[in-house]
Amino acid sequence: YEIIVVDVVTGEKTVVAMTAEQVAEAQAKAAAEEAAKNTPQAAMDVIQAVLDAEAQQVDPVTLVYFSSIHTAGIWVNSSNPARSARAKALLAWADKVWDFATEEQLKQLAGTPTYKTVAELIAALPKIGA
C-alpha cells in the first residue's frame, strides 16, 4: 500500500509505503486510541476541564473569576456580593452538568447510551445560565 501522509502544519504531503500488516496495525492502533478517548474516565476529565474553564472566565462587569470550579466553592459565602453570586451560579451549573453526566453514565451501564462519544456528550452538557 502507498499511504499519503499530510503534515497538518505545513500541508506537505509524503507518500509512505506500507505492507498490509502495517496498515492493519496502524488501523488497530488508531481504533484503540479513539476508544481510549471515549472511556468514562476520559469523559469525567473533559467535563472537569469544561467546568474549570468556565470558572476561569473573567466576568466583564465585575472582573470576578476563579482558578477552578473547586475554588469557586470556597467563595460561595463571600462578603463580596458579586463574588458570591458568581460562585453560586457556577456551582448550580456544575450540579446540573454532573447530574446530566451521571444520568448518561447510568444509561451506558444499562446498555442504552444516548451519546456514542465523549465529544457528543460534551456538546450536550447543560449551558451555564440555562
Image: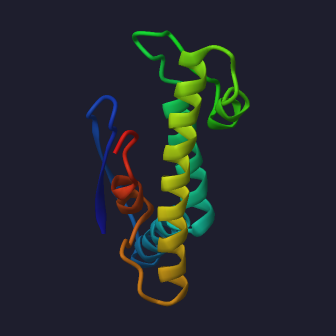
Q: Up-down: is 76 above or below 14?
A: above
One can see residue 32 in this view: no
For the residue pair 11 and 77, the one nearer the viewer reads as 77
Q: Residue furthest bottom?
A: 110
Q: Residue furthest right?
A: 74
| Quadrant for the C terminus in the image | top left
Q: Up-down: is 10 above or below 107?
A: above
Q: Is residue 60 left or right of residue 76?
A: left
Query: In the rendering, at what x and y percent does residue 71 appear?
Result: 70, 30
For the residue pair 50 and 96, the one nearer the viewer reads as 96
Image mark count: 0
Query: In the rendering, at what x and y percent does residue 114 appear?
Result: 36, 76
Q: Up-down: is 14 above or below 34?
A: above
Query: In the rendering, at what x and y percent does residue 119 appear?
Result: 39, 57
State how the image is colored. rainbow
One can see residue 20 in this view: yes
Q: Is residue 74 left or right of residue 56?
A: right
Q: Residue at x 37, y 71 (%)?
A: 115
Q: Residue at x 57, y 17 (%)?
A: 81
For the residue pair 80 and 100, the one nearer the viewer reads as 80
Q: Residue at x 47, y 63 (%)?
A: 100
Residue 16, image quadrant: bottom left
Q: Up-down: is 90 above or below 116?
A: above
For the residue pair 35 and 105, the one nearer the viewer reads as 105
Q: Residue at x 50, y 35 (%)?
A: 89
| Quadrant for the N terminus in the image | bottom left
